[in-house]
Image: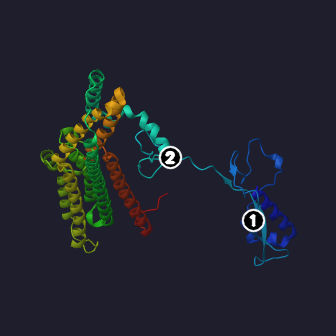
Amino acid sequence: MVRWILAAVALSCSSRCPSAAGAGHPALRRLPTARLQPTGALAPGDTPAGAPPHGARLAPRAARAVPLLVDLPARGAVSGDSTTRVSLPRAPTPRTSPPPPPRASRSGLLRDEDTAFPVHARYTTSSLWLHSMRTLPASSVLRGVRAPVLASVVWSALLAALHAVTHFHVPCSRPHTLLSWALALLLVFRTNSSYNRFWEGRKIWEKLLNRCRDLVRTCTVYRDAISLRRLRRIACLITILPRVLRSHVQVRPFADEQSLSTRDISACLLPYDKMVLARVRNKPLFIANTLAREIRAIPTSDALDFSSRERLFLLAMVNDLSACIGACERIVQTPVPTQYARHTSRFLCLWIFTLPLLLLPEMGFWVVPAIACISWVLFGIQELGLQIENPFESILKLDILEGMNQQSVDETLSLAGDYAEIALREDGELAPRP
């Protein structure tokens, strides 16, 4: 519709100014030419140009016309120096509805097409409580405390039946009450120390991923001095390092022939290196050492601005990777002291198994469900601390972190290749693309 209005104004001005129209005014050349049609000449279902699509919602202020300034020749003007400004109405701008918020999958992760990288979904109390109660039978904490909870329930049922028959004397509850604060202190310290280990493990892997990104980015900057073949080898070593480290800290076999014959490892390891990798115990450290040897073999080139300073800078990043490997091994090899864990478990068992004696006079057989709930809560706190003590087993999603590292390496290499091609085409060394 805008094009038709512009064409109509142009024809009107040309009829009033024949000299300007015959001279071919520049302003007229910029206007689109179109054959005028009546409004009813549109076919059914056609939409005029500039009109919003059917079903689109308009903004609240879009009903008013927006001025569109166009240069047109003034009346009687022959040259292109005298122009006038004509305000034409513009069609309202359609506004589409906002996209729906991303949904979380069953694993608690948002889909990759909704976010730039995998992130955990955030829950609210209104959505979390129903999901938590629905998945209670499949809880790993409940499976871990099933045996002591059943034992405490059976013990409380026997005491309730014995008390109903014999009415034995119940001891004083004051010592039990005085020891409650000590039990709470032990459980809180246990869970707090385990959470600190979990958070430290996440920070170690964050440092590992950052150093991998820094290393591959710096290598792409000096790709002319490193050579393309060595750059691909270094990038492949950086890609498989988190994968080998995950198998190392999870104490899973990785040295079988099927694992060593994968495409990723075969592409960056020589046959001799693959045989050594199958024999060594510390496989991620071997990958870091191989990476250091590759960097050491880069020749010094003053023309390409690669000297010993850049080589030492790259080797310092490899040293940081080795430090991350040692930090992960420290968490795995240094659990919470056994004496502390055993004392907490013994104290908790004695406290739970003597609690029914204090509740029997007031609750009777109702002590059985009460002890079941209390033992599930307290033993569950202890089990929670035991599970998050080693964050590399199942708490941290290390496979997702591996995928992020591989994606970062691939994108860095791809962008470096694109920029290099653009630079060569600008310099004229490559022919432009058709």
Mark 1 crowd level (few <14, some 14–19, many ≥20, 10 Å Cα): few
Taking the image as shown, residue 214 lies to the left or right of residue 24, namely: left
**Residue that mark 1 sits on:** 67
Mark 2 crowd level (few <14, some 14–19, many ≥20, 10 Å Cα): few
Whether 149 is drawn above or below 263: the answer is above
- Please identify the quarter of the rendering in which residue 230 is found: bottom left
Q: CA distance from mark 1 to mark 2?
A: 38 Å
Instruction: Please state the total of marks drawn on the protein image.
Output: 2
| Relative image position of residue 147 (x, y in whole percent) | 26, 31
| Relative image position of residue 142 (x, y in whole percent) | 32, 34
Taking the image as shown, residue 14 lies to the left or right of residue 324, namely: right
Q: Does dot 2 land on a helix, a strand or a loop?
A: loop
Residue drawn at 17 percent across, 57 percent down: 289
Q: Which mark is residue 102?
A: 2
User: Considering the image in quadrants, where does the N terminus appear?
Assistant: bottom right
Of 35 and 428, the residue lying toward us: 35
Q: Which mark is residue 432?
A: none
Of 277 and 418, the residue lying toward us: 277
The mark nearer the N terminus, 1 or 2, is 1
Q: Does dot 1 land on a helix, a strand or a loop?
A: strand
Taking the image as shown, residue 111 lies to the left or right of residue 336, namely: right
Of 329 and 266, the residue lying toward us: 329
Q: Are marks 1 and 2 in contact (CB under 8 Å)?
A: no
Residue 216 in sight in this render? yes
Amino acid bearing label 2: Pro
